[in-house]
Amino acid sequence: MSSKKDSATPDEPTTHKPPVCGGIAGLRPVNEEDLKVWDTYKEHLEKKIQDQFKVPKSHTLKPVQVATQVVAGMNYFFKVELPDKKYATARVYHVPWQKDTHGKADQVSVHAKLSESPNEDLGHF
């Protein structure tokens, strides 16, 4: 008699990934707290994305999904829709207790590769 195991075999996809200490959580919709972080760094996020991907300033950049990673603070990996239905991934390193770092350009970076889908995982950068 066989019993069903919780872990997936090589032929079965894993449907639930347990959290890993220091790992990046899965993508999810942006919530109000995420938007507060986005807004804190918005000026630098917009400039870096516009410059890197030649996005017109008339296009409103806003995050559609986010993944987070607990580090000595929090990394936010924002997926941002661009005019051509491609997605940029921008990382914000936010340390809530270090107010002097809030809104600083060096806390923001943008992945060099564009995604075809907001669900594409580009991993850590």
Image: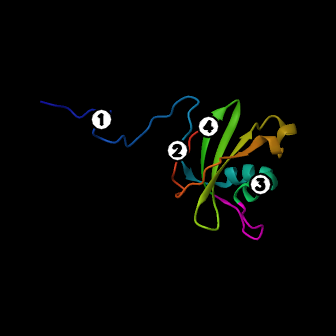
Left or right, 98 with respect to 55, comes to right
Q: Residues under labels 2 and 1: Cα distance?
A: 21 Å
Mark 3–mark 4 Cα distance, whole angstroms, equals 19 Å
**In front: 104, or 83?**
83
Q: Is 61 inside the magenta-drawn segment? A: yes
Residue type, numbered disc 1: Pro
- Place of residue 55 in the rendered image (x, y in percent of width and height, measured from the top left): 72, 64
Quarter-of-image position of residue 18? top left
Residue 93, above or below 84: above
Q: Mark 1 or mark 4, which is nearer to you?
A: 1
- The residue beneath circle 2 is 26
Disc 1/disc 4 C-alpha distance (Å): 27 Å
Q: Position of residue 44 (x, y in %)?
A: 80, 52
The first of marks 3 and 2 along the sequence is 2
Of marks 2 and 1, which one's residue comes earlier in the chain?
A: 1
Q: Secondary structure at mark 1?
A: loop
- Residue 60 part of the magenta-drawn span: yes
Q: How busy is the neighbourhood of tag 4: few (under 14 within 10 Å), some, or many (20 plus)?
A: some
The amino acid pointed to by label 2 is: Gly
Which residue is situated farthest in the bottom direction here?
58
Residue 11 falls in image quadrant = top left
Badge 3 is on which residue? Answer: 39
Query: What secondary structure is marked by label 4?
Result: strand
Mark linked to residue 69: 4
Q: Quadrant of residue 76?
A: top right
Q: Which residues are magenta?
A: 54-63
Q: Secondary structure at mark 3?
A: helix
The answer to whether the residues at label 2 and label 1 have Cβ atoms under 8 Å apart is no
Q: Kindly report which numbered mark, 2 or 1, lies closer to the viewer in this rendering.
A: 1
